[in-house]
Image: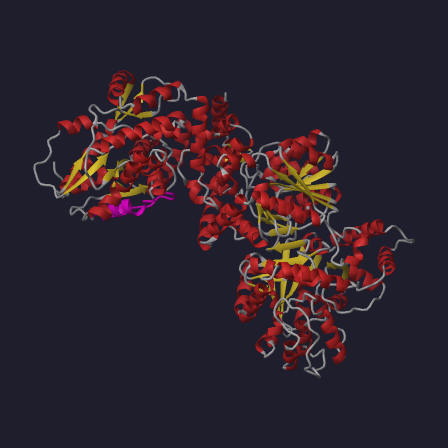
Amino acid sequence: MADDKLKQKISEGLNDESARIGRNRALGVIKPSMQKAVIKFPHLRDRLRAIKQFSVAHLDELLEKTTEVMQQRGTKVFIANTQQEALDYIGRVVGKGLVVKSKSNAGKEIGLVHYLEAQGAQVVETDLGDRITQLDGSTASHTMAPSIHVPIERVAELFSKEVHEALHPELEELIQAARKSLRSFLVRADVGISGANAIVADTGAVVLSENEGNIRAISSMPKIHIAIAGVEKIVPTLQDAITVIKSAAVFGVGQDIGTYISLLSGPGRFENDDFAFMGDAYGPRELHVVFLKAGRDKALQEGYEESLYCINCGSCLNFCPIYAAIGEKFGYKYLGGRGAVFTAMHEHLDKAQEAGLSLCIDCKRCVEACAVGMKTPEMIARLRSTVANERGLPLAKKVAFHELSSGKLPGWVKLAKTFQNLGLINVGDGMAKLRLPLQNLPADRLVPLLAEKSFPEIVKRRTKPAKNFPKRVAFFAGCVVNFVRPDLGLRLMELLEGQGVEVVTFPEESCCGIPALQSGDEADAREMARHNLKMLALKNFDHLLFICPTCATTVVHEWPRLLQDEPEWARQATEIAQKSIDISSYLVHVLGIHPPETAMSLTATYHDSCHLARGLKVTEEPRKLLQSIPGVELVEMAEANACCGFGGSFSMSYYNLSRRINEDKMKQIAATNAECVVAACPGCVLHMKDGVYHEGGKQKVKHIVELLAEAYKKSGETQK
Amino acid sequence: MSRLQQIAKLRQELIDDKPDLAAQVTAIRENAISNLPDLIATATETLQRKLANVYFAKDEAELAGILKTILKGESRVSRAHSNTLAEIDFDGIMTNLGVEVSLTNMEEIVRQQMKLPDHGHPRLLVLDQPRHVIEEGLRRYTGHPEKIAPNELGRLVTEQVKQNILHSGCGVTGADCIVAENGVLALAEDDGNARAVSSLPYKHLAIVGLEEIVASVEEAVTVIQAASIVGAGRLTPTYISLIAGPSRTADIEFRMAYGMHGPKEVHVILLDNGRKALHQGAASSLLKCINCGSCYESCVELAARQQWTDVTMTPKDFALGLLQGRLSPLKSKAPMREFSCPVGLTAEDVPESLARI
């Protein structure tokens, strides 16, 4: 089953310590370089996206033009409709010859090396990293630095065997030996095979970027050069190709451009036609360009054309928390979330599941990092929805989402509370341990205790303060506040009432729908949206407040989209979306809250929740509020906007992954020496409490509303 | 039809297809000239940032000194053809240093073997020679005793040249452009020998005139494409190679090392040799010239009238030759025969400007 295979891959990925060390090493250098470089080229992303958008929209036309120009120049063009066609064509050209090869995602896509070796050809990887992993028999640990997990002693061993000499584990010596060894293959190779970073329609050029010089070698020394490329590599002009090249360097590794760029427009020929009768000059006698169409057609037909904008720079991987945790186990041939999307296009949904379609935690860092701004999490959500429609959901989820959508939550919760008293051990601070491990939940996993009384129950019994309120807001509590942390809801009410704002709540609130949506269940998510909209329509308010940014993002971005085909619901959803605001933005921009008067001595670090920072684009307001409390010192952690690993239902389905991601966050928090971690998301707070418990730490974890309520209470500014 | 007539015909077809190209290239070259001092400063910095060794040669004497520093101890270098290398008599300097120079451009090889005259065309080094002369020149180069099929001969020549390159301590080229924004050298060619020369030996040396500096990579490829269309009647050269410093890899334990497949050292000599004076004088527009060869026949006529010999037939090389004192001052400002120019120089302007030097 795809699910079991995936669980196994996750396990293997989490346990591969050497790959992880290698990955962290590479990422530690690449990420800061990329962030510095991107700032220097502010227009690059927009320019690239426009080029790719145009090219993909005119794909057939451009392919036709490219073929014509290339063929006129003597390049042999083969358009492969299937992977097998491409393999057969290349297989025929190569025969049993000696092939020298440079990195190619397209080659990997069709399983080229395996195919050629099976027919008796010898294939030598010429990129040093690829050659090391080839000799070592291991798999690449990172797309840009495939062999950094191989220690230098092992490299010495491998090349000593190759060159029949005892080599020392010394960098210079090994580089020279590798150069000599690979050159000996290059000078006698029959065929050179490469991919292509871009193809230019105007001039029929194959464009390639590199740092070592092996691509120059494989495309000039053998008499035959084959370049494989997906049709989406085609761009109209030379200048467009330069934009692609620059973007790949800037976003992929933080270089402004690769060391060597080769623009190859045909087989060898003489500048002086009078010499043409002498042959092909110094270049290859034959240049073959093999275009892959398989899967690209599907992407266009099914509305996933944005996936074709990808330039394979790997920037998304550099920031993806799942990739950081399990490396190349996330994906299939193409890595990461976008790899799962490509797999769905090139192969089929089962393979995409195996690739990790359900692993994307929707942190949206890839969207921020992407050279063309691909909205990969959205494409993944659509594919999950297709999977759910075609295969249905697992039974437990089906039942749960159905219950949630029909608003039967209270009954469900009562049942859970009974279990809670039997099966959980309270460890304080609102969290509990399981008495016995359950599937997916090891015994040491902390789970939030369901509150004695739910938020609606407490509000019902609460005496509203007797005073006139000049202002009024509505509050959408969300499930965590309603059933686990009702105290946060109460703190919010106290805080706002102290500021003269009346807070209206909704006892019949149903889940916002995001858990169903993340599993691909759009039908139930729609039901929940409609239920909530009906409820919201009964009250008048200008602002709908959220202290859970995931609920807010769902209401603002997903409800209108889900209901876009039902005009009346769509109108209501849009209206509610426009009134929706997170608590920090409300306090800073709408209410204009004054700083509290009494000081509290505290060092705090702030964690940017994914849905607040990237879903709603709010980062400054919570910090401003924190810093406005006298005596609070804000210390920034290294990567405040990295995901904490919660992901809502993700932490249930993939707890071990969730934990691993959280470990990195905990390390950063510890490094700040802050007494308290503050976040503006109840989910992050839950997960980081679990994290502190596991690390044996002493930090307090608070939602910003809790901290603010404390601060204003001290100054007597909150209603009791 | 002669080779030049064929090119003229192809040129016209391509220009008709790209009516905006001349205006673009003219703008690029004009900007380059007006920003020359800034471009030189930026290019020096970016070349160095990419770990190329950068030198500045005021004149041929300084250049010879720099070459001695870089190439002392080398027994052999291989070189591609470049007008700049011809301008400074690179081969002569190497002879004085005791360094053997292997030619790699087949036209140059034929010219040398058959003692053919140098017509001064900036791109075509052998003009309108019959096949048997070309074959004989290459046969002599290989030392092969008898006549063999042209393809076979071609293969023997390229093999021999490649062996020379593989046994050279340094490969020497010019450059079509230097890109100031990121320290990139742009080499454009069809034959492919410049790629071999600049990638196989441990050292790569490029000698480049100051006027070759452009601001961006996009500008460089635009100029290169224009030169190909106008100079060769071809849509694009077969190979455009962009080089930013030495070859590098961090694939072993993520530690940076140089000279993996390509050169370990890149040396770039920025050549003045009259270019600064030309830039500061009243004839600075001639620095726009990209040596495409489109005005070749008109230049040949002018040179004949002036009795100028031993010079590449382009407005820029005439100007530099005058400044360097190699050519006698211009006798007549009469306009040249009409020609098409991708950077907006005209048959009237050129002699007018040359007269001011």
* Spot occupied by residue A625 in the image (x, y as percentages of width and height): 24, 46
Residue at the far right in the pictured view = B146
> In the image, is residue A209 above or below residue A93?
below
Residue A537 vs residue A500, the one in the foreground: A537
Q: Which quadrant would the C terminus of chain A be assigned to in this image?
A: top left
Residue extending farthest left: A466
Most foreground residue, B155 or A388: A388
Q: Is residue A633 magenta?
A: yes
The stretch of residues the image draws in magenta is A617-640
Q: Which colour scheme is used?
A: secondary structure
Query: Is residue A170 left or right of A442 when viewed as pictured?
Result: right
Q: Residue furthest front?
A: A567
Image coords of residue B39 (percent x, y): 54, 66
- Residue A442 in sight here: no
The residue under the point 86% across, 57% down is B135
| Left or right: B79, with A389 as reference point | right
Callout count: 0
Q: Where is residue A183 in the image (x, y as percent from the top left)?
A: 71, 45
Please state which of residues A466 and A162 is positioned toward the viewer in this rendering: A466
The answer to whether residue B137 is visible is yes
Residue drawn at (48%, 48%) of the image: A49
> Residue A294: which quarter of the image?
top right
| Magenta highlight on residue B313 | no
Q: In the image, is residue B357 above or below residue B256?
A: below
Q: Percent x, y for residue B60? A: 68, 72
Q: In this view, does A523 lie to the left or right of B198?
A: left
